[in-house]
Amino acid sequence: MKNNRQQKAIRIVATLALTLALAGIAIPAQAQTFTSLHSFGGIYGTPPDGSYPTGLVQGANGYLYGATTAGGNETPEVSWGTVFRISTTGTETILDNLYTEGLSGSQAGLALATNGDFYGVSNSGSGANSPGVPYKVTPSGAFTTYTDSCTVDCGTGPNTTMVQASNGDLYGANQGGGAYGEGTIFKLTLAGAQTTLHSFCETQNTEGYCLDGNGPYTALVQGTNGDLYGATHDGGPYGGGTIFKITMAGDFTTLHSFCRVSGCPDGAQPYAALVQGAGGNFYGVSSSGGAYDAGTFFTMTPSGALTTLYSFCGLADCADGSAPLALMLATDGNFYGMTGSGGASGGYGTIFQITPSGSLTTEHSFDGTDGFVSQVQPGPYLIQDTSGTFYGVTAEGGTDWPGCPTCNGTVFSLSMGLGPFVETLPTSGDVGSTVRILGNRLTGATSVTFDGVAATFTVAASTEITTTVPTGATTGVVQVVTSAGTTLTSNLVFTVR
């Protein structure tokens, strides 16, 4: 009886902590520790491990996975990018060389799907499918190329990481191409069938701006209402980009249009994906505009009402950085992101923490030897691992910077003293549907609950549990009790459909 009361108390405390975080009440974090884990060898060289990494994603086995835009061979003529795996201590393994697959570069990062495999899109391929080719890679490196996935109105320049929606399909965006040459939004099934859902720039205004935007650089995010939300870097009636939503069936709506003139108070030209936070509102950053024309942090209602919460400084030595390119919501209720310039160490950019109300703290200033973000590769630069630690990539820089032509990106970790958690894949499902739970030290787990309702489960590995949504489960957090008696809570609420 005492143990049951203790477990109930632990669940209530953990649920309260997550509720506070999701409600926008930030939990103070501990002092930070930054560690450089890996510097990429360059466009070509020995070993040819790639260059210009485009982001990271945690796999079910606990390793981190990513792709590079270039590198992977000892001669520059065939240095067309790689897919890699890296441990949380920095040991890297090249899983595939894109040149050997007939592909060239991968500016889009990898997406982890519910089947445990990773999906990406290369910049181009060969033959009729040269605009860009989706591919799948298993955790061990088995590679599948979907060369015949699209033949009509295909987009070009896929810069964004795809996202798996609640229907099981992947959704992404192309920077160019499509029916009007200004980019697309597409759907990709796990079997590789691709469908173009929207082509940007069907209509223009008298100034030549695409009214629905063009050049989407940001990944899509699925809202709690099931619709997908994203942003374009350019276009809209004022030329500064747009925020839009699109249903899984392709119904498109422009929600907000940024202006382009210097000092636009709401910002302009967003690179980073939106994040849904408290009460269903979205948060985001723009790379320019704001009070100092150096970018903003903003919140937006699902209907498109936008409020600027913070303006980044425009000077090269501003401690808070400028031109923010990444944003994510962590388990302490704060947002974390990265800037492409500024900071206290020569203007190479920063890692920052910002509260939902807009109070910013600079956590790290890059100096070039530990990398710098740049605007070369807009992508998912920063993630939070289930250990609680942040991991990220920079697109340029490295150990021997400056004066190093082969210093083309890094992998780093940032500890803020946050505790471990579990992550569900997917984040919603019907009663009886299969769910993967990712975490650490899960061997010997004694309990899995969905909003307090016990579920049957199997420990597949120390980093993965497989389970099904139990009868009677309602929307709420998922919790795992480990063999040590520790309760791990999911970073997001699981929605029971």
Image: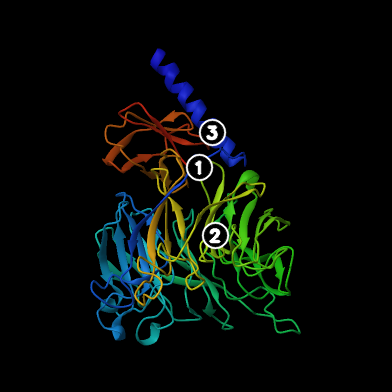
Instruction: Relative to 342, say whether 69 is above or below.
Output: below
Do tag 2 and tag 1 residues touch (Cβ < 8 Å)? Answer: no
How many numbered badges does the structure rendering display?
A: 3
At label 3, counting other C-alpha atoms closer than 10 Å, the crowd grade (few under 14, some 14-19, many 20 or more) is some
Q: Which sits earlier in the primary sequence, circle 3 or circle 1?
A: 3
Residue placed under numbered mark 2 in the picture? 344
> Decide: marks 3, 1 in contact (CB < 8 A)?
no
Report the side of 94 relative to 106 (left or right). left
The answer to whether residue 191 is visible is: no
Q: How is the image coloured?
A: rainbow
Looking at this view, is 220 or 285 the one in front? Answer: 285
Label 2 neighbourhood size at 10 Å, few (<14), some (14-19), many (20+)? some
Q: Position of residue 417 (x, y in %)?
A: 45, 40
Tell me, yes or no, if residue 136 can be seen here. Answer: yes
| Among the two numbered marks 2 and 3 on one chain, the one whose residue lies closer to the N terminus | 3
Residue at the location (54% across, 74% down)?
Answer: 184
What amino acid is found at the position of numbered circle 3 in the picture?
Ala
Q: Quadrant of residue 478?
A: top left
The answer for how far apart the CA atoms under marks 3 and 1 are is 9 Å
Indicate which disc residue 17 carries.
3
Residue name at image x 36 percent, y 67 percent: 67
Rendered-image quadrant of the N terminus: top left
Q: Earlier in the sequence, mark 2 or mark 1?
A: 1
Task: Give the CA distance from mark 2 to mark 1.
Answer: 27 Å
Mark 1, residue position:
331
Q: Is residue 155 left or right of residue 72?
A: right
* Disc 1: CA contacts within 10 A as few (<14), some (14-19) or many (>=20): many
Left or right: where 300 falls relative to 414:
right
